[in-house]
Image (spheres, rainbow, N blue to C red):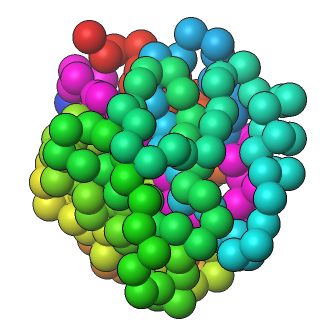
Amino acid sequence: MKIQEEDINRDYQAIVIGTSAGGANALQTIFASLPKNFNLPIIVVQHVHPESDEYMINIFRQECALNIKQVDEKEPVKPGIVYFAPPNYHLLVETDKTLSLTVNERVCYARPSIDVLFETAAEAYADSLIGIILTGGNYDGSRGLKRIKETGGLTIVQDPQTAEAGSMPREAIAATKVDHILPLTEIGPFLVELAAGTK
């Protein structure tokens, strides 16, 4: 797709991604498009079983050029790293751009919750944030993406027709005026273009 001038001329500082059912394949597709010198941090909530290990993250480490890790409490957000929420913890972005973990009540039946990540990231990054909703089977993330839009961030949703589970993308599209609805294969290259324009 042709990138808009108003999208490219912005100083993005972080990307947040939320996904659930089908997310592993969707994330693999996006990560495969990102070069080693990709300069934006990516913070991910993928709904997983509370007792999951790092098997999925280890697969991503083998196939992705970027540094991929599970979040540690109070660590600072750094460029070029992909951060994953640990199983059974909510992941929050603090206003000082550090990451924190909580075991508060589930949100939309989920912990980690996409909404919790997105809403806190929106407050921390405002209009320098990119929020992305991918495939998933419920409505988690729609409220958080709306908040990103309200604080001036850029919002992207996977085209539901290209999603393994279309409910989450459809709910996000219904919740707010999304900036871009993209087929899965176009999201990674689009992010590369956006990052290239970042100061």
Image x and y of residue 192, in percent:
52, 23
Query: Looking at this view, is 186 or 61 the one in front?
Result: 61
Image x and y of residue 40, in percent:
43, 25
- Residue 89, relative to residue 73: is it above or below? below
Image x and y of residue 15, in percent:
41, 40
Residue 135 visible to an observer of this rendering: no
- Name the residue located 69 percent from the left edge and 47 percent from the top edge: 27
Q: Is residue 35 left or right of residue 106?
A: right
Q: How many marks?
A: 0
- What span is colored magenta in the figure? 7-29
Query: Looking at this view, is 187 or 40 the one in front?
Result: 40
- Residue 62, relative to residue 186: is it above or below? above
Q: Quadrant of the C terminus?
A: top left
- Name the residue located 26 percent from the left edge and 38 percent from the top edge: 97
- Name the residue located 76 percent from the left edge and 72 percent from the top edge: 51
Image x and y of residue 35, in percent:
64, 16
